[in-house]
Amino acid sequence: MSVIVRTGETSAPTVPTRRPQRRYVAAVLRTPRGLIGLVLVVGIILVAVVGPWVIPQDALTQGPDALVGPSGTHWLGTDEVGRDLFARLLVGTRVDLVVTLIAVPISGVLGTLLGMVGMLNRFAGSFCQRLFDVLLGVPAVILGIAVALAVSPGMGSVIIAIVLVTMPKFGKQSRTALLGQLPQEYVAAAEVLGYPRSRIMFRHVLPNILDAIFVRFAVEMAQAVVVEGGLSLIGLGIQPPQPSLGAMIKSGSTYLFDHPLYSMAPVVVVVGLVAGYLLLADALNEANLRR
Amino acid sequence: MIRYTLRRLTGAIGVLLIASVAVFALLHLAPGDPATVLAGPDATPQTVAAIRHQLGLDQSVPHQYVSWIGQLFSGHLGDSYTIHQPIGSLIAQRVGSTLQLTVAATVLTLVLGVAMGVALATSRRRVVTQTLDYLATLALALPPFVSGVILIFLFAVVWKVLPSGGYVALGQQPGEALRRLILPSIAMALPSAPVIARLLAAEMRRVAQQEFVLTAIAKGAGRRWITWRHIVPNSVGPAIIELGIRIGQLLGGAIIAEAIFARAGLGSLLVQAVESRDYRLAQVLLLLAISAAILTQLVAELCIAAIDPRVRVGGTA
């Protein structure tokens, strides 16, 4: 058998040259899903980051005009204490992005590594998997509420909740991907060469399972937006007066008749973000399968 | 089957034990002394000591845990601190609302999921499958709190055909109670149904390649008969397991739906308990929700094992 040639081929993606990567990004963008997803996510991030600096209104300043409709000064109108809804929408989106973009990367790194631990120590590996099973058995909202009971609700508690909800999924994903890589010849070759297991794990296997982890990352970003929104909506997430998408949807739902934009605007942002991440995940997955 | 049942059962009990320790520990993880928090800022030291004694906080931690578990099993849940009513009767008053909502949402998830899944797997027209696929992605992107508000806006504000929320006991006004269940259960089922649909469709496409389907075709059975009689029953396994897991998530969704649709249920009670730092009530409700989630998952796994012997044999993985 042409063992040497084949290992040479399979280890090629471990040392990626620039061109396959560029082709990978192009493959993601060429599908309509990938393009729409990217435009949605990047668009919302840009508006939320730049917006609050550009518009003159402040998210916390109360004004004399409560619950007025859209106008030149208040693009989306005002809420029940006269705060500008557009400013609150932008800042709320920003808070959501900050929370999810802190929580999911932490959980991604932790989960991926804990999922691979089994390669170094079987006992630790199965312990981590059982831990993930326990966490997965608890509904996300319940987990978030439990965290809010343990530490007082706020940005910190939401971040912890998102990490607890999403980490086991990364763990399971990396475990599955790892088990798929272990029988491959490049792993055997590295073992024959006498490399320590930790080196094989980080230098050889990890780069090869990253594409699966990226798909998971996009899916869990969507999940994180949902968790943050849900917890803030029931009052156990981001605390007022700090604006949040979930809390805006909830307080706006009282005024759906006279002032539908109050809760519809944050609804649109949440749907845009979640759908954007999910479409990106789909496109990434497709690109991975085609490779 | 008995061995498999025992193995799953011990697993579930193990998870439940860990969960009970974790829920119990919440009280001790909390910042500050719970008794002081509960007593309020201008409580006398005597009041704080009395509350501490009542909570059992003056005893050793393992002793507290054991007596707490004992209370749970004997049904003596004690009184809620903030609502001043027995926890047992509070739960009894509210459980109906949440149960109705979860059951309705589960049924709807199953019906929508199977219908979409079968359509996805059997339709030969690309337009249909593509549209369904996009609809599925859209539904996935609609968490209950988002679809809930949209549904209220459309059906209660614009068209005025359905009530925007509230809870009526099923026994008193069955019609009105059902009408009020429609919107929240749709909101809860929307993000779950596509998951079921995709799992079912994938499995159906796999099953359709198998020889017994060819035999059925050769026998001259109709397309519809083959789909519903031969392919669907052999493909529901993964979807049922997923549904078992989803019911737990639906319970979580019920908490959100109760907030949006202003229904008095266990979810709104839990939120109220956490907001007022009513640890006893919150702990009982959390453990109840977790047990329900674990139980439904267990039931789904056992159902599948009863139907499909392969699961029992290969189920170790």
Image (tube, coloured by chain):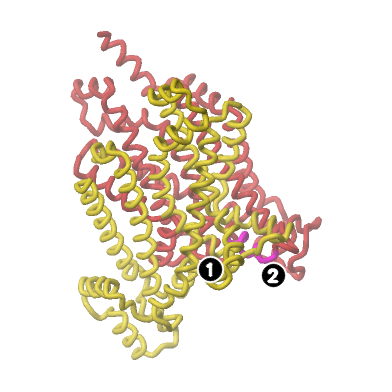
**Quick one: SS at disc 1?**
loop
Label 1 packing within 10 angstroms: few (<14), some (14-19), many (20+): some
Residue A76 vertical placement versus B59 (above, below): above
Q: Quadrant of the C terminus of chain A?
A: top left
To which quarter of the image does residue B173 belong? bottom right
Tags 1 and 2 on a common chain? no
Q: Which residue is depicted at the point 30% across and 44% down?
A: B306
- Residue B180: x and y, percent? 60, 63
Q: Is residue A50 left or right of residue A278?
A: right
Q: Residue B26 appears at what percent x and percent y?
A: 34, 67
Q: Position of residue B241 (x, y in %)?
A: 38, 45
Q: Chain of mark 2?
A: A
Nearest the eye: B137 or B168: B168
Residue type of the residue flagged with mark 2: Val
- Dominant SS of magenta comes to helix
Q: Which residue is mark 1?
A: B170
- Binning the other alpha carbons within 10 Å of mark 2 as few (below 14), some (14 to 19) or many (20 upward) gives some
**From which residue to which does the magenta span run?**
A247-255
| In magenta stretch: residue A249 | yes
Residue A152 part of the magenta-drawn span = no
Instruction: Give the labeled residue for mark 2.
Output: A81
Tell me which chain the residue with mark 1 is part of: B
Give x and y (percent) for residue A128: 27, 46
Is residue B130 positioned above or below B148 on the image? above
Q: Which chain is red?
A: A
- Which residue is located at x 31 percent, y 41 percent? A115
